[in-house]
Image: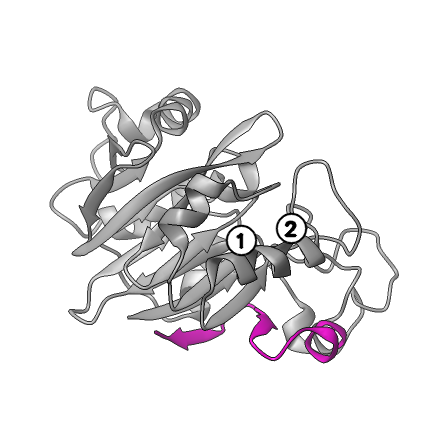
Amino acid sequence: MRLTFLGTGTSFGVPQIGCDCAVCHSADPRDRRTRVGALVETDAGRRLLIDTPPELRLQLVAANVSGVDAVLFTHDHADHTHGIDDIRAFTARSAGPLAMWASPATASALARKFPYIFDDAMRALPGTFKPEGRLHTVEEGETTTIAGVDVTAVRVPHGFAEVHAYRIGPLAYVTDAKAIPDAAVAVLRGARVLVVNALFRTPHPTHLSIPEAIDAARAIGAERTYLTHLTHRYSHAELEAELPADVRPAYDGLTVEI
């Protein structure tokens, strides 16, 4: 299995609009962080896209991705969904809608926000194209085969939002979590690679801090952990120097073999 980090930044992205900090003006390309998204490629060549962030088109072009087999959503916040229109490039060349998986609450929100994608009665005019998706739901604790790999959903708290973390074969993928409850740890434990959000060194009301993310990594026990959803407060080099050897900051375009 191969994991590619398409985007690793917070909802603001890095550089942040109007910011004059050193990280926002860094010459290190690893400090340019678009909104969070990822791509999982199976050994059989199937591709599972995790979330559709606003820079999705640019991310897919940069990663040379010409098609995906399914989309898996963590939750319905704008920085994880508002690039959904870019799936049009896939469905314009396909015979049918793209399968999209999410919790029932997230699926309902997507259908409400983007009816033109999911309502079969809303057809594109002749000679034009629209993105076409087919929503499927995955319940907490349920294991579903998506794009040829078993995916198990677990709920993690994120303020008022419902967020799904996922066990995807040997990968544990957690983003926008304030904590990882024991029930989620039990499902994610033993994954070879863990991806987990980490915001500040100090506590945040809706996200794991960097120390909390490290503690979560120890509880889950992955061989390697990659931090994502990173801010402009810390450069890649700075984080890399201070983190434990088995915990690394992710960056846009990083590919990991699992």
In magenta segment, residue 244: yes
The answer to whether residue 128 of the structure is visible from this angle is no
Region rendered in magenta: 238-258
Q: Residues within 10 Å of mark 1 (few under 14, many from 20)?
A: many
Left/right placement of residue 148 relative to residue 188 reads left
Residue 205 falls in which quadrant of the image? top right
Residue 64 falls in which quadrant of the image? bottom left
Residue 191 falls in which quadrant of the image? bottom left
Amino acid, disc 1: Val
Q: Which residue is mark 2?
A: 10
* Quarter of the image with the C terminus in it: bottom left
- Where residue 128 sits in the image (x, y, percent)? 27, 39
Residue drawn at x 33%, y 26% is: 116
- Where residue 235 sits in the image (x, y, percent)? 75, 70
Q: Which residue is mark 1?
A: 36
Cα distance between the residues tagged 1 and 2: 7 Å
The answer to whether residue 10 of the structure is visible from this angle is yes
Instruction: Identify the colour scheme used.
Output: one colour
Image height of 157 relative to 68, above or below:
above
- Where residue 54 sits in the image (x, y, percent)? 53, 47
Image height of 163 relative to 254, above or below:
above
